[in-house]
Amino acid sequence: MKKTEHRKGSFYWKSLVLVLAITCLPALLIGIGIYNFGAGPIVRELNQAHQEQLNQSIRQTDEYLSRLELFSAQLAFNPEFDESLASLNFAEQFQKTKDLYLSLALMKDSNPLIFDVAFYLKDSGKVISDHWGVRTLQGEDSVRAFQALLDTDRKIYWTDSLAKLDPNHSSYKGVVTKLYPTFSDQPFGAFLIYLNQGALDQLVSPLAAADGNAFLMNPDGSILSAHDHGDTGLRETLTKRILAMEASQDSFVYKWKDTSYSVSFGHLSRLGKDWIYVSATPLDRITAPVNDMSRMIVAVSAFGLALALLLSWFASKRIYNPIQRLVGLFHSAKESGSDRMNEIAYIERQWKLQLDESELLQGRLQQSLPSLREGYLLQFLQGRIMPFSDQEVIEKLRQYEWNVEGTRFAFLVAGLYGKGTPDAKFSDRDEQLIDYAAANIMQELCRTAAVHAHAINFQNSTVGVLLAIDNSVPAPQAKETLLALAADIASALSGLLKVNVAIAVGKLTDSALALPGLLDETSKTLRRRDPNEPIDILDVEDMLPDMGPIDFPLELEKDIIQSMRMGLSEEAADGVQRFVEAIRSKAGTQMHVQQAMLKLLGSVYDAVFRAGMNPDSVYGGAHLYEDLMKIRNPDEMIRWFSVSVIEPFIRSATSSFDSETRTIVDRVVEELHRDLLTDVSLDLYASRYGISSFKLSRSFKQVTGVNFIDYLTGLRIEKCKELLLTTDMKVNDIAEALRYQPSYLIRLFKKSTELTPGQFREKFSRSPG
């Protein structure tokens, strides 16, 4: 193809000047403007951002101290630490001491500033700490030092020299929370909160930028905490300068060793103590980005101006390229060109030729409309296309030659089940053929009953039909027509294809946007079919969302799980059969049967975990819930449950222990009921039957579903209930008979029944007469 060369005219030179002006002038003006007017605002913005960052760090520091203050106040109301602890024998009452250690450890871990929390008892001279243990103060100096903590008038206060228990440490900073007995103003002890100096220093660190300095000091100038890498000389100088100032907070610029610092200080008040925070940041760290930016702007502006000149010249030469390429697309070898050829007119002629060709293609597109309409409907009904309005859907269908103005919509969804009988099955290829035939039959039968009808083959033994019905037909009459049509379709499908058929008749709707939800609702209605009926017509409007209460066979469920645990596969399978028959006799729908089977499957999983087995190992990683949801025939559910659930469970359970071990576990259970009031243990029975404690513990859980201790505890709680209701024994006597401490028995009993033993006896004991 031969190109025609064109001489550059005035348009080329005009475009060159225009491009030069467009590219060079803005770059030049922007560079000058940013350099002259941008530096000042940027510096102010950076200073403001720095100050905001500093304020945020100060707020965070104040928040940490506020939490410490709140935590100290809460300690004063802790009911676990009262004056009764003064008479506690920490060596003999080990459990109580252990609980105190645990409480103190939890207090210590509640705040990162806390190094340790100690509990000081004045009368006994003891200090209890998770870090130092239980210590009795030795020496008069130690006793006086700790008693002096209680001599102040304040109930909660801060101290920079908290009495120490560790002789290797010089002093601690901390908080003292005094504790008072009931109806007395004389403290019997105190909580001593020892603070971690490293954490305090780390708390101050965010106040300091790189190469800066930050610290927290007392009003007398002593340092409470400081940034690790700060200059100590600068710190001392700033301390003197700030203490000499009368302002409570201020910011100023201070020069130190040829470096200017932006200094900010203010006051923090917590725990009855007033501190001064100080932050010093080098100014060059704040303004460095502006200086670098100014130099960069000058360099980039100069480079941009030179580059703009070069690119302008290059762009003007290329400005003709789009027109030349368009002409080249249409230019033929036979057509003669000239320098005065009107390229625009030539392109217009060629464009008209393209329009003619487009009309030809449009005609061919009309022939493809049915398949395009089918693809659109399928994607829309499956939720892959989300139109904004009914009119958009109607307009789209009109493009596909479906005029649905003045119509209402409805769905018929048919489910095909079995071949001849509910128990029979057919191959995948047979299913595909039957689905295809059913879709064609339904399409033909629905064609005369509606303005438009479209069959959808879901490829899973389910076929749906979308019907557009004339809106002039009254809704009750249209619904009667649909029900009669559904009966005709069901009869034809059952007679021709030899299958059981259930057809769900959906609601009528005027909204095209409601069609995806309507299809889903109609399809789900098939789950309410009666599996025993060869032909079942379901009206969505007659299907209530709640079919009434169902008497779930809990006893049968327990029998099935127990049979599986004992390795009785036939008894477990028979139990599943009776379980399904019980559900069907009460409800009778596929949905309720499937939901009950899902509940039973969940109980099996619970038994697997209680037996200490891994479900992935037992069932080979199979997704049993998903597999069960795919089964719609109750009889097939029974067969599947026996093969896929019961047998793998029993194989895994029986492989982990032999019959002799099971017999031992049964004997242990019998002896537990007999020896309930004696001092029994897992090691005792393991020694008695010559088996390891580990093996007996694991086998006991696999057989009973719970571990040994929980089983024994449950028996003793039941025995406690019996003694409470049938005897006048005191709770302490019952606890002693059951081998428990009274407080421990009360805690176990309340955890089990949500009542104390006394409340239980009062609530459930029979009234006289």
Image: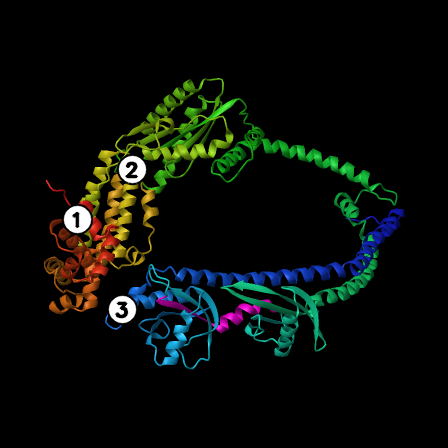
Q: Give the numbered dot on residue 626.
A: none
Three-letter amino acid code at disc 2?
Answer: His
Q: Earlier in the sequence, mark 3 or mark 1?
A: 3
Marks 2 and 3, Cα distance to the nearest angstrom? 61 Å
Of the residues tagged 2 and 1, which is closer to the observer?
2
Q: Is 198 inside the magenta-drawn segment?
A: yes
Of mark 2 and mark 3, the one earlier in the sequence is 3
Name the residue beneath numbered marker 1: 570
Identify the residue shown where x is 62% and y is 31%. 363
Asked if residue 111 can be seen in this view, the reply is no
In the rendered image, residue 45, in percent from the top left (x then y), is placed at: 70, 59
Density class for disc 2 (Cα within 10 Å; few <14, some 14-19, many ≥20) is some
Q: CA distance from mark 3 to mark 1?
A: 61 Å
Snapshot quadrant of residue 287? bottom right
> As rendered, which of 452 and 662 lies closer to the eye?
662
Residue 134: image x %, image y %? 32, 74
Q: Which residue is mark 2?
A: 592
Which segment is the magenta one?
187-208
Q: Secondary structure at mark 1?
A: helix
Looking at the image, which is closer to me, 509 or 61?
61
**Relative side of 10 to 200, left or right:** right
Which of the marked residues, 2 or 1, is nearer the chain's N terminus?
1
Residue 524 in sight from this viewpoint: yes
